[in-house]
Amino acid sequence: MFESLADKVLDLTGEVAYIIPQAIIIVAALLAPLLYFLTKNGKIPAIVSFILAVGAACVCLGYMHTKTYGTAFGLFEFNAFSGLMMCLFLAVAGLTIFVSPVHSETTKHQGEYYALIMAATAGMMFAVASNSLIGIFVSVELVSITSYATVALKKNDPRASEAAVKYLLIGAFSTALTLYGMSMIYGALGTITLSELGYRFSEVGVNWVVLMGSVALIAGYGFKIAAVPFHSWAPDVYEGASTPVSGFLATASKKMGFAVLFKIFFALFIFAQAIQYQPIQYIFAIIAAITMTVGNMVAISQTNIKRMLAYSSIAQAGYIAIALAVMSQYAVTGAIFHMFTHVVMKGGAFVIVAALITAGLGENISDYKGLAKRAPLVAAAMMLCLFSLAGIPPLAGFTSKFVLFSSAIYVNGEVVTEWLWLILIAVLNSAMSLYYYARVVKTMYIEEGESTEKLVISKVFMVAIALCVIGIIVLGVYPQPLLRLCRTAAIALLGF
Amino acid sequence: MDFPILSILVIVPLVGALLTLFMGGARAPKAKFIAAAFSAVTLVLAVYLLTIKPEDLADLTENYVWFKVSGVVKMNIIFQIDGLSILMVFLTALLVFLVVLFSWHEENNANYYHSLLLAMEVGLMGVYMAADYFLFYIMWEVTLIPMFFLISWYGGPRRHYSAIKFFIYTHVASVIMMIGIFIVVFSAHDGSHAVSFAFADVAANSALSEFMQIFVFGLLFFGFAVKMPVPPFHTWLPDAHVEAPTGGSVLLAGVMLKMGSYGIIRICLNQDIFSLAFGFWQPVMIGLGLFAMVYGAYACIAQNDLKKMVAYSSISHMGMVLVGMGCMSEIGIQFAIFQMFAHGIISGVLFMVCGIAGHNFGTRDMRLLGGMAGKFPVYATFMMFGFMASLGLPGLMGFIAEFGLLYGLWTYLAAHSLEWLIVFGLLDMMLTAGYYLWAMQKTLFGKLTDKIDLEHCHDIAKNEIAVLAVLCGLIALFGIMPSVAMDFITPYSSVLGPALEALL
């Protein structure tokens, strides 16, 4: 049934079919302000955007199911990798939109708010689908600019304005670096098409211009993934922004950064891998090690839960960056899988924080004292999210970390000791991170709060939290279906 | 495999844990019935396993593929049972059931308490039956969270500190163990099919160089040694024990510490994987074991808190297990397993006795107690029985284990012309007798104390008597007829022991 449907769509639309998911989201972005203008009710654009996001995700899943892969206009490619990443972005966008109408920090300018979230999502989807450097650059810019505005939308909070300005300035700087890097690569290799980059590079050979361009690109997109030392904006922005937006940035926007880095660097070094192009791998390995260490160490001393989650997501970026250093199919599978588990656990944690803020609780960790008595289900969900982030089995975070860490020891069919130091750092970090996660659990469960009054949590939040918790448990205990998709995506990305 | 009894041993407590978890509010007092029922079913199944002939145990093995990653790596769910694990499984089922009965009057959030006990049982059963590195590691970690909450919710005054220390200390050890597992597993592939985490597949294909064997053995050994615990990695244990509730302490000492020694026998002492590492690690294990024995016993003498004394005595007794494993001979392995079993039962009695002191008398401080035997004769009998069993009185279980282990140690020392080291073994026996007798003298005998409010002291409860009587009966049974337990152990140790001896 799906096959014939997909064929019909292809017959009707031609190659436009491959950007239908993005088109749906753009329609949502245009509809949202219009609907808000007409109805003056924030729920309407939210519902419509949510439905369209779910619809777009269904289209992606349908295409992947029927293996309807192809390229639109020679620019935007729908393959197993971009399809899976689109589903990830749509899931995050859906979650964000789902909880926004009931969240107390959500701006009054709701038409613009949903339009911006949808536009950012569309940008991410284009970014993973683009098959040229310029396409990637423009799509990422779409995401960046809408993100600045989304952060700034929380108007009456000076922290949000500060965060937005900081984000804008640093973002502009990173954009410049990125473009500079791309121009160097173009200058040296004479092409901006990803599929030709690797071939040209293997012809030209080891080239300092390409290397410098790569470093500039790493720095530029390093800002996006909040890798140390390009991470300083992240805690301020996550703390300043409205909480669902923080969750959106921490889970979706960061994953787009990784997806783009994967795309560019695997395209560039796909042939170079045969000759072990080590300088870039080592740069990524060192960035990964520093990122996870700094993220975890600074997280320990945080007192604000959103800042703590921000540093913890910096640390998680460090774990994902292991795949960039190792560059094997198994590692990339693990990285994509970790992106998904990160969505459920970190997204879940941010949704819980948002729910608690709406219920009148503060953002400080000390405000969570006695939470287990005041909101037992939410506290239990938070505990699962945090333990999953710390990598305690049998939760999702453990399974994905297990795959990711083991990929650095088992590269392309043999045991290598080259990355043993990186894995040692990673597991020690993982153990260290348990300290600050367990501290929050301790605060919720063990310390007595001043108030024992029950908190009223909106049903909408409960549904969103329940979805995340189910995700955490299912991905931990039965990861097979998603792992298979991740593997297909990794093969599509790497070409082997 | 008609009836998946091994998976059911894991599933029954899991269902019980989930049921009791959601019995909050007014239904909480009924949770203990559910917990008792589910742990009783598990115990019955475990006892049923004991009736199966040792050579037929292999037929019970269950093997499922759990998931595959990227077509490169395969995780399995494999449960198996053999002479090493069968007594541990029985011990786990027994102790959990008895702890549920022992804590019958626990009223503070009783449903969570029982849920945590059953969740512990899930993890412990999993560890002892897993035959896949991935499953083993997961189950190993699963035991952490219930124990963390048992300590931090139901524990003593410094419970927060102890719980976090316990959690992080042992988690660090396990992640280091995880690296060891990675290297062992991934080095054991022949490239033709997906890397399997199953014990058997790894052992069949392992090919580590000598240096890597020694290195990886060290990583794994560290993970297990922290759990046992072996000094100098023991500091979490006294804290955790002193603050844990009685039920938690019983499980912690009785079966959780055994996870460490079990792991060493099961994973480190694997002649297919680490054949070249034994020569390097044998003296280290013997040395650390002797140190643990003497250090633990010596530390006991300095304690005023009964429970802390018993906690240090666990370190000393687990040191003995380490020495037995370090002998890497048939007798060493055999009695190491027997000592694990014996210490599991005896430490159950010891920690329950300490718990009763804290609960019924209001203090466990030996300086405040005295002459309790006259006032509470039943309690005193159990305490004396437990202490005597632990110090190795002939006729009781502890004696058999210690005798066998010292004999094994002597064989090793004589073969290496190190006979003088036996002095440490004897020193340990002397110190052990010393601190137990001293403790009894201070708490049970002499003048009746006037430092505590005797009016409010109450005698041992009926359910506590029943539980202690069962354990003491087992101690006497296995003391007089050790062959009952040995029949389970020998088929395993008579294969592993000679194999190890042949390699050294």
Image (spheres, grey):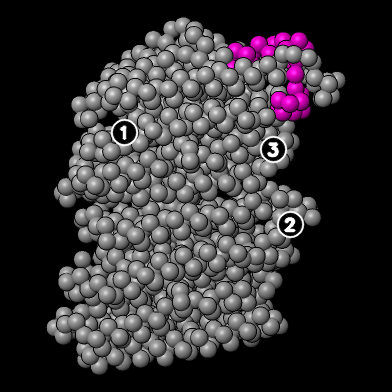
Q: How many residues crowd around disc 1 within 10 Å: few (fewer than 14), some, or many (20 or more)?
A: some
Quadrant of the rendered structure where residue A31 is?
bottom right
Q: Is residue A335 at all visible to an observer of this figure?
A: yes
Q: CA distance from mark 3 to mark 2?
A: 29 Å
Q: Which residue is mark 3?
A: B156
| Subunit ID for the residue under disc 2 | A
Q: Which residue is mark 2?
A: A455
Q: CA distance from mark 1 to mark 2?
A: 58 Å
Q: Are marks 1 and 3 in contact (CB under 8 Å)?
A: no
Secondary structure beneath label 3: loop
The residue positioned 25% from the left and 69% from the top of the image is A494
Q: Are marks 1 and 2 on the same chain?
A: no
| Subunit ID for the residue under disc 3 | B
As for residue A97 lying within the magenta part, the answer is: no
| Subunit ID for the residue under disc 1 | B
Q: How many residues crowd around disc 2 within 10 Å: few (fewer than 14), some, or many (20 or more)?
A: some
Quadrant of the rendered structure where residue B66 is?
top left
Q: Which residue is mark 1?
A: B282
Secondary structure beneath label 2: loop
Q: Give the amino acid at mark 1.
A: Gln
Of residue B365 and residue A137, the one placed in the foreground of this image is: B365
